[in-house]
Image (spheres, rainbow, N blue to C red):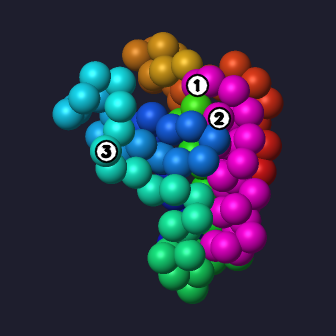
Amino acid sequence: MESFYYFGHSNCYAWMLDYGNNIMAVSTEWIHETDLNRIRRDIFTPQSDCWSFGCYTGASMSRWWKHIVGVPLWGNTESTRYGPVSDGRLPEGAGKWVK
């Protein structure tokens, strides 16, 4: 796999896959950073371009991803703004993009 992009809700520890569907503003399905060991490392090339556009993933999950999956994951240390998407641009982070 040469690229991986996550667009959705998250916190610094997990991607929230159904945020707000069953219970308002709560997720009942997620991928936690400790679940990343279920991903096969060998599907990624060493040059894979991996990004998480969920909020706060750069605060913790990016480090776990690199350690477990073996390639960097760009994530923002703060919230993500999706407004630019309506102008054909990628989401912007309020904090720093880190990997």
Q: Which residues are magenta?
A: 56-80
Residue 28's disc is 3
Going by the numbered disc 3, the residue's amino acid type is Thr
Taking 79 as reference, is 74 above or below it? below
Residue 39 can be seen in this image: yes
Q: Badge 2 is on which residue?
A: 56
Horizontal relation, residue 37 to residue 26: left or right: right
Residue 59 location in percent, x, y? 74, 41
The 10 Å Cα crowd at callout 1, few under 14, some 14 to 19, many 20 or more, is: many
Quadrant for residue 90, please give it. top right
Q: Which residue is mark 1?
A: 80
Question: Which of the two residues, 39 or 13, is positioned nearer the viewer here?
Answer: 13
Of pointers 3 and 2, the one earlier in the residue sequence: 3
Hey, what amino acid is under mark 2?
A: Tyr
Q: What's the residue at 69%, 27% (across, down)? A: 78
Q: Which mark is residue 43?
A: none
Against 99, residue 38 (above or below) is below
2 versus 22 height, above or below: below
Q: Earlier in the sequence, mark 1 or mark 3?
A: 3
Residue 42 sits in quarter: bottom right
**Is 71 contained in the magenta span?**
yes
Q: Position of residue 50 (x, y in %)?
A: 61, 56
Label 1, label 3: how far apart the Cα atoms are: 21 Å
Q: Residue at x 35, y 38 (%)?
A: 27
Instruction: Report if residue 43 is visible in the image.
Output: no
Q: Dot 2: what SS?
A: loop
Q: Position of residue 43 (x, y in %)?
A: 52, 80
